[in-house]
């Protein structure tokens, strides 16, 4: 009896071990391709942003291979491949799949997952193996205060998000001094809020209201009642998609008017206008990028910078094919830019060694359709990319700031609730 | 004789040993093994309470979270005192203490309630704690705590990376062994017999003089402390950050329930097998069918509940009833 | 004085929101009262209702109020489907099984919604003017939601009291064996209760969008499940009327406590409001578990 038991247990164990071991015998065959990869959220709370990122990267992957001819090293052109796994927006999955990419798929150039938290989660693994880690969806400045040397950033950090709208309002109307902050209570939004508060102070604004609302709030009326009483000129705030939509809607419900309102994220989506109709007119949002941004080979030349990658129109074409007709928002664009930055840096370094590429990155300053790219050598933080300010004007999302990138003049002051309800459009003269 | 009594515990240790070996011998397998161990350990801690009492703690993830905070606070608030590596045991101690304290507070109230009322009371724990931290703005409020820098400053880059990518998982193995041991001891002790009586028929047990609340509380506290330790290592030490919006996600409680149900609640081997299968399936589904995991798992769960309520261990027990295996698979 | 003005404005909004919350929870209480099943997938059905309202409005221009019966029928259909497919087999199983089963059904609905409709956040705009009061400005859509909620709750109450089916259900709750002896088809009524409960939940999702017409997405339901549990306990877990009144109380507490907590310096009052809500839950469970309005 005992012998039989022992035998069975041993057999099961052996079968098990063999199965697990075989499961990673499928190691990728290499250097015929340069693999740039990462974990990305295709399910869970970041599913939407993750999907945009995948489309964006796939679009430029095609461009690099078909138009650019692959990545050029030592005179040879090697095709690039984008490899990705779904991390389900969870940190444990990020760490385990990240290591798989590095050890099993032998990826040396990792694209970080979406969101600051998940970006942090993958950092120790990346650092241990000495491979590069490009943040395209982790904006928190704190990531770059931790002392990692292999983490670099393509998008603007959180602290910069709402500084552009502040600059713009300060320029357009120096008399608009009273400012209200109403942000979502979350790590990212607070980082934005902190940057905005510091910048507002520098510009001489007076903060008359400063509150947050919880992430899952479904009704903002209590805090909005207070906001109305504060009688501010400008409202800066928001968080993510759903709460931004809710905020805009309820501002209208309660007829609270400002000279300008800049909300994070939500107004940058077409869904915002679909949901609110003309009530969405003249709402502003900061964006890492917008369709129509004037970053092009010509504008790069006028600034004395090299330009790399497809033009915006070509990117749009490739993207629309990948997404089956869905337009890119800035999540797609920033992921694409991250991929392009890797290809460019590898070519400039003329090497596939992460240390060489990292050193070369310190010297680079170039432009893509997404904007300028330059990192701080010590922390890897992005310093040259500027946020743009977007505004809904006449059912279209226009770029109104900075003047160099704008597709339309700003519409200021904002339309009142009454005007928007009557169907007036925010088209500047 | 002794072998038979300890056989399920030995099998558990054997499985852990095999997993550890696989991870050590094939470096590419280390993280997947660590992920599987996380599910196993999470299931085990949950099972200490669920399996013994039949009560569902819907606020389970709050204990993982508070353990995570314990470690984060230990490291971030004390690293400048120069105690170096002692930060780690300090973190674990804090994690266990805080989780224990929370469980006494919650258990004191909730364990007087029966069945569904208990489940609902515990739902509130998770959300309540999260909003308290964010609302009263302590422990970093909604911005949480990041321990990368304190770790790198105290331990230097290489050790800090090692801690996050290797040692955190070794600790997890140790915690899993602890959990298995505690489950085993409970099952074969007075606590276990009392709780079995409670689980089968609480009123009858009370009539017989069993202090149901006391034993339920013991199981609840132990389950929560182990969960706290798991959170401290797999969430805080490994990922180096704690954000409230991240660690209070109810989906982990759900995963724990699935793992225990899949394997068979109330057994020693149940969570182990459940964790193994769940971890492997999840890993491979993420690689092969990104985005569709839950769509496949959800109906699967329903099938298991309807057709195999005793989980896999339950099925095996049925088939081996009356044979030598009967005593082994527990 | 400004404080009082704001407080009363908040409380008024709280009452209106509370009506919708209450209706939303009645389905949960009905299912628990009759079947002793806690529908942990509650939020997913609210989400279904929200999408019904959205699609009916966006595709056919149907006023959301008129989508209410559609929501009810769809919910009942889903209820019958899931009852005969899953719940019937679990009637004698331990509590854990039904908890998990309802949860899995909820997840399944969310994932299907994500696959069919995508993870995008949707919304619509039904502009029917606003009511301007001195303490607050309230969109008419919310008033309609309030009136409909009250009307539907009264309707359900009458159904229970006056119709044969309703009476039979009440007998069933009181004494299962006695009801069976009286010739009541127990399983059939279980199915009906489950279907009604889910029907009401989907219906409440439609009304919810009158109140909050944006942020509609596959995972929107989770937060409502939590609120519904608090409200259900408040009103007495097995009592649909208790749930309805519990909703009002919850709405008042949620909105009112914001003004009071706002007086404390250096905190985030809105987040603390949510904390207060859950503490209320624990206090009630401790002191009067059968709910403020339930009977032991």
Image (spheres, coloured by chain):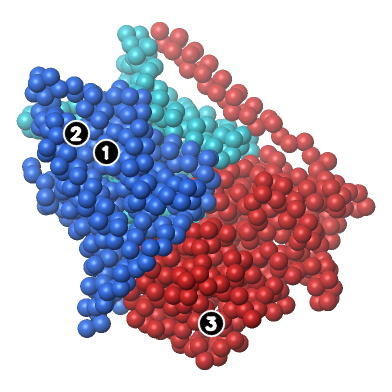
**Which circle, 2 or 1, is nearer the viewer?**
1
Q: How many marks?
A: 3
**Separation (CA) of disc 2 from disc 3:** 58 Å
Q: Secondary structure at mark 3?
A: loop
The circle drawn on residue A413 is: 3
**Chain of the residue under the numbered disc 3 shown in the image:** A
**Chain of the residue under the numbered disc 2 shown in the image:** C
Chain C hue? Answer: blue
Chain A hue? Answer: red
Q: Secondary structure at mark 1?
A: helix
Chain B hue? Answer: cyan
Q: Position of residue A374 (x, y in %)?
A: 73, 70
Q: Which residue is mark 1?
A: C197
| Residue plotted at (48% across, 68% down) | A279
**Separation (CA) of disc 2 from disc 1:** 10 Å
| Residue plotted at (81% across, 51% down) | A64
């Amino acid at each position: 009896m005992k012998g039989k038991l022992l035998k069975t247990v041993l057999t099961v164990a052996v079968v098990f071990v063999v199965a697990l071991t075989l499961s990673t015998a499928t190691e990728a065959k290499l250097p015929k391709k340069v693999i740039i990869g990462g974990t990305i959220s295709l399910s869970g709370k970041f599913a939407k942003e993750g999907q945009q990122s995948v489309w964006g990267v796939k679009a430029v992957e095609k461009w690099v291979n078909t138009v650019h001819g692959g990545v050029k090293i030592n005179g040879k052109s090697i095709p690039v491949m984008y490899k990705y796994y779904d991390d389900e927006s969870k940190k444990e999955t990020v760490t385990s799949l990240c290591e798989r990419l590095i050890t099993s798929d032998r990826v040396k150039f990792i694209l970080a997952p979406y969101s600051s938290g998940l970006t942090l989660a993958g950092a120790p693994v990346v650092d241990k193996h000495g491979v590069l880690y490009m943040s395209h969806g982790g904006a928190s400045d704190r990531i770059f205060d931790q002392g990692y040397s292999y983490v670099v950033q393509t998008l603007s950090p959180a602290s910069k998000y709402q500084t552009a709208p502040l600059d713009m309002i300060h320029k357009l109307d120096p008399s608009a001094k009273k400012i209200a902050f109403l942000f979502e209570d979350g790590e990212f939004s607070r980082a934005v809020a902190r940057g905005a508060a510091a910048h507002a102070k520098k510009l001489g604004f007076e903060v008359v209201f400063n509150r947050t609302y919880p992430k899952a709030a479904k009704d903002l009326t209590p805090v909005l009642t207070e906001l109305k009483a504060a009688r501010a000129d400008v409202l800066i705030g928001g968080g993510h998609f759903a709460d931004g939509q809710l905020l805009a809607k309820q501002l209208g419900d309660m007829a609270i008017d400002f000279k300008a309102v800049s909300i994070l994220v939500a107004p940058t989506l077409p869904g915002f206008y679909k949901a609110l109709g003309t009530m969405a007119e003249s709402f502003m949002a900061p964006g890492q990028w917008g369709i129509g941004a004037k970053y092009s080979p010509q504008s790069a030349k006028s600034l004395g910078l090299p330009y790399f990658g497809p033009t915006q129109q070509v990117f749009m074409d490739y993207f629309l094919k990948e997404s089956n007709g869905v337009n890119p928002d800035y999540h797609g664009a920033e992921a694409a830019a991250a991929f392009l930055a890797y290809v460019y840096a590898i070519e400039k370094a003329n090497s596939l060694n992460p240390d060489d590429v990292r050193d070369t990155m310190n010297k680079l300053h170039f432009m893509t359709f997404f904007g300028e790219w330059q990192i701080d050598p010590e922390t890897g933080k992005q310093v040259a990319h500027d946020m743009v300010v977007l505004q809904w004007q006449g059912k279209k999302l226009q770029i109104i700031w900075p003047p160099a990138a704008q597709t339309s003049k700003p519409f200021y002051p904002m339309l009142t609730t009454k005007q928007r309800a009557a169907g007036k459009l925010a088209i500047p003269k | 004789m002794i072998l038979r009594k300890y056989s399920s515990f030995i099998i558990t240790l054997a499985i852990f040993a095999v997993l550890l070996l696989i991870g050590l011998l094939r470096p590419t397998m280390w993280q997947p093994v660590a992920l599987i161990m996380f599910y196993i350990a999470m299931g085990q801690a949950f099972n200490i309470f669920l399996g013994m009492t039949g009560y569902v703690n819907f606020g389970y993830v709050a204990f993982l979270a508070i353990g995570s905070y314990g470690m984060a606070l230990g490291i971030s608030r004390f690293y400048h005192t120069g105690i170096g590596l002692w930060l780690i045991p300090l973190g674990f101690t804090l994690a266990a203490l805080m989780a224990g304290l929370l469980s006494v507070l919650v258990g004191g109230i909730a364990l007087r309630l029966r069945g569904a009322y208990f489940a609902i009371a515990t739902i509130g724990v998770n959300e309540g704690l999260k909003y308290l931290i964010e609302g009263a703005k302590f422990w970093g409020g909604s911005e949480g705590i990041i321990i990368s820098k304190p770790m790198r400053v105290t331990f230097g880059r290489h050790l800090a990376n090692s801690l996050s990518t290797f040692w955190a998982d070794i600790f997890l193995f140790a915690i899993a062994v602890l959990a298995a041991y505690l489950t085993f001891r409970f099952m074969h002790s007075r606590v276990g017999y009392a709780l079995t009586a409670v689980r089968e028929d609480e009123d009858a047990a009370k009539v017989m003089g069993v202090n149901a609340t006391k034993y339920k509380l013991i199981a609840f506290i132990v389950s929560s402390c182990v969960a706290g330790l798991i959170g401290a290592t797999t969430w805080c030490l490994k990922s180096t950050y704690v954000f409230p919006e991240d660690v209070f996600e109810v989906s982990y409680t759900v995963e724990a329930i699935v793992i225990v149900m899949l394997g068979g609640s109330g057994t020693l081997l149940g969570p182990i097998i459940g964790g193994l299968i769940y971890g492997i399936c999840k890993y491979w589904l993420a690689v092969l069918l990104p985005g569709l995991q839950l769509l496949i798992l959800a109906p699967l769960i329903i099938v298991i509940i309807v057709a195999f309520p005793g989980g896999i261990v339950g099925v095996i027990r049925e088939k081996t009833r009356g044979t030598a295996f009967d005593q082994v698979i527990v | 004085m400004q404080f009082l003005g704001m407080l009363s404005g908040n409380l008024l909004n709280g009452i209106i929101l509370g009506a919708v919350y209450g209706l939303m929870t009645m389905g949960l209480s009905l299912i628990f009262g009759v079947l002793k099943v806690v529908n942990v997938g509650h939020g997913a059905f609210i989400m279904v209702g929200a999408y019904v309202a959205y699609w009916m409005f966006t595709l056919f221009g149907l006023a959301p109020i008129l989508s209410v019966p559609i929501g009810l029928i769809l919910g009942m259909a889903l209820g019958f489907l899931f009852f005969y497919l899953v719940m019937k087999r679990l009637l004698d199983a331990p509590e854990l099984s039904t908890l998990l089963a309802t949860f899995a059904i909820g997840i399944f609905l969310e994932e299907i919604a994500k696959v069919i409709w995508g993870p995008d956040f949707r919304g619509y705009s039904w502009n029917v003017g606003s009511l301007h009061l001195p303490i607050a400005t309230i969109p008419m859509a919310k008033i309609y939601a309030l009136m409909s909620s009250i009307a539907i709750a009264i309707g359900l109450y009458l159904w229970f009291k006056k119709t044969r089916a309703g009476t039979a259900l009440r007998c069933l709750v009181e004494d299962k064996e006695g009801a069976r002896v009286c010739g009541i088809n127990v399983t059939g009524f279980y199915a009906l209760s489950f279907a009604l409960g889910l029907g009401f939940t989907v219906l409440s999702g439609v009304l919810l969008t009158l109140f909050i017409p944006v942020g509609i997405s596959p995972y929107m339901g989770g937060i409502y499940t939590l609120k519904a549990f608090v409200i259900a306990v408040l009103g007495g877990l097995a009592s649909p009327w208790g749930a309805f009144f519990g909703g009002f109380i919850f709405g008042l507490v949620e909105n009112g406590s914001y003004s009071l907590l706002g007086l404390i310096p250096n905190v985030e009052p809105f987040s603390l409001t949510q904390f207060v809500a859950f503490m209320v839950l624990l206090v009630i469970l401790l002191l009067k578990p059968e709910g403020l309005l339930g009977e032991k």
